[in-house]
Image (cartoon, grey):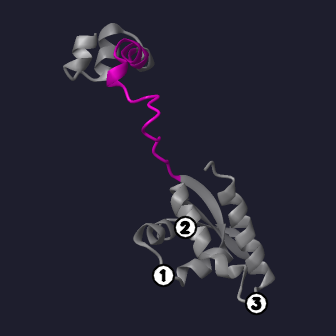
Amino acid sequence: MCTAYLDGRSIAALARDHDVSRGAIRTAVADLLPEHTTVGSEDSPAPESPVTLDMPGKVADFLRTTELEPAERAALDQAVSVRRGQGYTLRVTALPAVHRRLLDLCQPLDSTAGISAIPARRKARREYENRVSALAP
């Protein structure tokens, strides 16, 4: 099995050949050939996966008027709008780093240089901040 794996056979093919699950093959490969697996490697961080967060419509409206990077603009453009009472919520799927950047960009909704912010916008920004803060760092 190890030589077949090293020769390039897929885990799925090995699982079919030996009539076991793919997980069993992965475990066997990890146990017998630890230098050929990347699982558990401390020196390489795990890649972030996209998460879906609800963004209040007031935050989304503000962000649409600001200058965004292509990844941020794409995240907003691909988001799904969900009606909520009088307003709406934007269901945004993006990497946690993109959510943090969007949160940083909507900082002016809180208040800027002594100018008081509109309470509803400030509350909307705080709600989004709570959702983004709940993400694992």
User: Which segment did they paint magenta?
Assistant: 25-50
Relative to 6, 37 lies left or right: right
Residue ID at (43%, 36%): 43
| 29 drawn magenta | yes
Q: CA distance from mark 3 to mark 1?
A: 23 Å
Read off the residue under disc 3. Answer: 114
User: Label 1 is placed on what type of residue?
Assistant: Glu
- Measure how far apart labels 1 and 2 are at the Cα level: 12 Å
Residue located at (52% from left, 62% from top): 98
Q: Report the mark closest to the observer, 3 or 1.
A: 3
Count residues near mark 2 (Cα–Cα under 10 Å), then give few for <14, some for 14-19, many for 20+.
Answer: few
Reading the chain from its start, which is encountered first: label 3 or label 1? 1
Q: CA distance from mark 2 to mark 3?
A: 23 Å
Say whether marks 1 and 2 touch (CB < 8 Å): no
Q: Is residue 98 left or right of residue 37?
A: right
Looking at the figure, which quarter contains the N terminus? top left
Residue 16, x across and y down, in percent? 32, 14
Q: Residue furthest bottom?
A: 115
Element on which disc 1 rests = loop
| Circle 1 residue | 67
* Residue 79, percent from left and from top: 53, 65
- Reading the image, the residue beneath label 2 is 101
Q: Is residue 23 left or right of residue 54?
A: left
Instruction: Give the mark nearest the N terminus, 1 or 2.
Output: 1
Q: Position of residue 77 (x, y in %)?
A: 48, 71
User: As shown in the figure, which amino acid type bears the numbered disc 3?
Assistant: Gly
